[in-house]
Image (cartoon, rainbow, N blue to C red):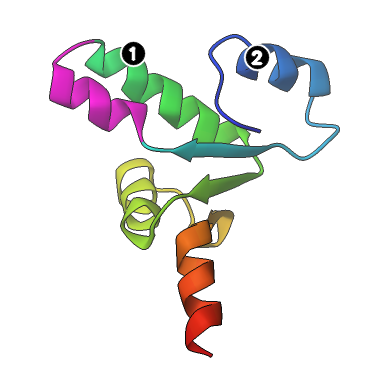
């Protein structure tokens, strides 16, 4: 599921972990909060909670995968890097 302030907590509570939850954070809100110097602790705790409760996490790039593993001690096997459409097109074009 794509991160949504309105839907995430409701869907997680409603599923009661009966269904696997895959969360797509893409760009860390905690990093954005650090950049903007706004709600830093809130976003750190929110991301930590999401990562702890979801069954799998989708990251945008390998450095984000490393970031989540290091920052939140998330097992790397719980995180998948999803290739961008542009990367997939380039790979297909070169073969």
Q: Could you give the CA–CA distance between mark 1 and mark 2, rounded to whole angstroms?
A: 17 Å
Secondary structure at badge 1 equals: helix
- The span shown in magenta is 28-38
Secondary structure at badge 2 equals: loop
User: Which one is in front in this view, the residue at disc 1 or the one at disc 2?
Assistant: 2
Residue drawn at x 62%, y 19% as measured from the top left? 8
Residue drawn at x 30%, y 43% as measured from the top left? 71
Magenta stretch encompasses residue 13: no
Percent from the top left, x then y, of residue 87? 46, 67
Is residue 79 depicted above or below 19 in this figure? below
- The answer to whether residue 83 of the structure is visible from this angle is no
User: Is 31 on the left or on the right of 59, as rendered?
Assistant: left
Tell which of 49 and 27 is nearer to you: 27
Magenta stretch encompasses residue 34: yes
Percent from the top left, x then y, of residue 95? 54, 90
- The answer to whether residue 89 of the structure is visible from this angle is yes
- Name the residue beneath numbered marker 2: 7
- Residue that extends furthest to the right in the rendered view of this protein: 18
Percent from the top left, x then y, of residue 90? 46, 74
- Name the residue beneath numbered marker 1: 42
């Amino acid at each position: 599921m794509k991160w949504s302030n309105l839907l995430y907590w409701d869907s997680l509570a409603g599923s009661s972990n009966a269904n696997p939850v895959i969360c797509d954070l893409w760009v860390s809100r905690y990093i954005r909060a650090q950049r903007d110097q706004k709600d830093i602790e809130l976003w750190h705790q929110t991301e930590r909670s999401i990562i702890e409760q979801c069954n799998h996490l989708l990251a945008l790039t390998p450095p984000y995968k490393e970031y989540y593993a290091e920052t939140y001690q998330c097992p790397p096997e719980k995180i998948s890097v999803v290739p961008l459409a542009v990367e997939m097109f380039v790979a297909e074009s070169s073969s």
